[in-house]
Amino acid sequence: MSLPALVLLPGMMCDGRMYTSQLEALKDVAECQVGYIGGADNISEIATQVLAQAPEKFALAGLSMGGIVAMEVVRQAPERVTRLALMNTNPRAEIGDVKSARKPQIQAVQAGQLEQLVREVMVPRYFSSHQPHAQLDELCVDMALTLGKDAFVRQSLALQNRHDQQATLASFNKPCLVLMGEEDELCPLDRHECMVALLSQVIFVKIHNAGHIPTLEQPAATNAALKQWMAQ
């Protein structure tokens, strides 16, 4: 009997390496593939691209921007998604302060400052302060540089103009996981509590000693939560 399909969507300026541990840990329970979310400058088109590459029926997990794209995938094709995991993400439209900060970031990256922006602005907000994470910092910088400045611009525009997805979640009645690193500065607790309140079949897991990317920072705890969700 074949294993169920699982599509994993990475965060902004990340690639499949942010799911290295999950791909290994889940290989006995799912046929995993990592989707690409850097190919368009709006969330709707990115979700359409993900659907075009995905199996007919699949479980879907996304972290941060990957979770935002996952919610749009569910909005477009709820009948194809068998279960949904939303990790360190946000169902709401972008708030004004964050939206206005994107334009100077885009300009800086177009002027050749991608590495500086990733090192100085993005990566310092990714991980918990409780343990060394220099190796993870370098991985995140390398993932961003591999994707490049054009992907940064497209992803920034897509996030800036995204729609609220709370109604999408309220209408989705299949097994769901909401997971967050307890020290996430970028997507804090209230965003996750909002998603939990909207979903009808949901497990809520908080990962200790983790920030915005628990798949890298606390892989064992993250893997355990994903396995529990896949077994629902």
Image (cartoon, rainbow, N blue to C red):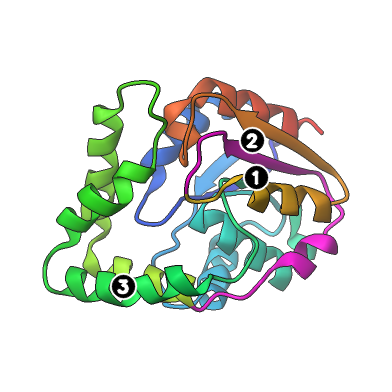
Q: Mark 2 points at which residue?
A: 30
- Asked if residue 154 shows in the view, the reply is no
Q: Is residue 175 part of the magenta span, yes or no?
A: yes
Q: Which residue lies furthest to the left in this view?
A: 112
Give the image quarter of residue 74.
bottom right
Q: In this view, does 101 lie to the left or right of 178?
A: left
C-alpha separation, residue under disc 1 versus residue under disc 2: 6 Å
What amino acid is at disc 2?
Ala
C-alpha separation, residue under disc 3 versus residue under disc 2: 33 Å
Q: In which quadrant will I find the C terminus? A: top right
Q: Name the residue under label 3.
A: 153
Q: Residue furthest front?
A: 97
Q: Tell me which segment is drawn in magenta.
A: 161-185
Q: Mark 1 points at which residue?
A: 5
Q: Is residue 126 left or right of residue 185?
A: left
Q: Does 217 appear above or below 189?
A: above
Q: In which quadrant will I find the N terminus? A: top right
Q: Are marks 1 and 2 in contact (CB under 8 Å)?
A: yes
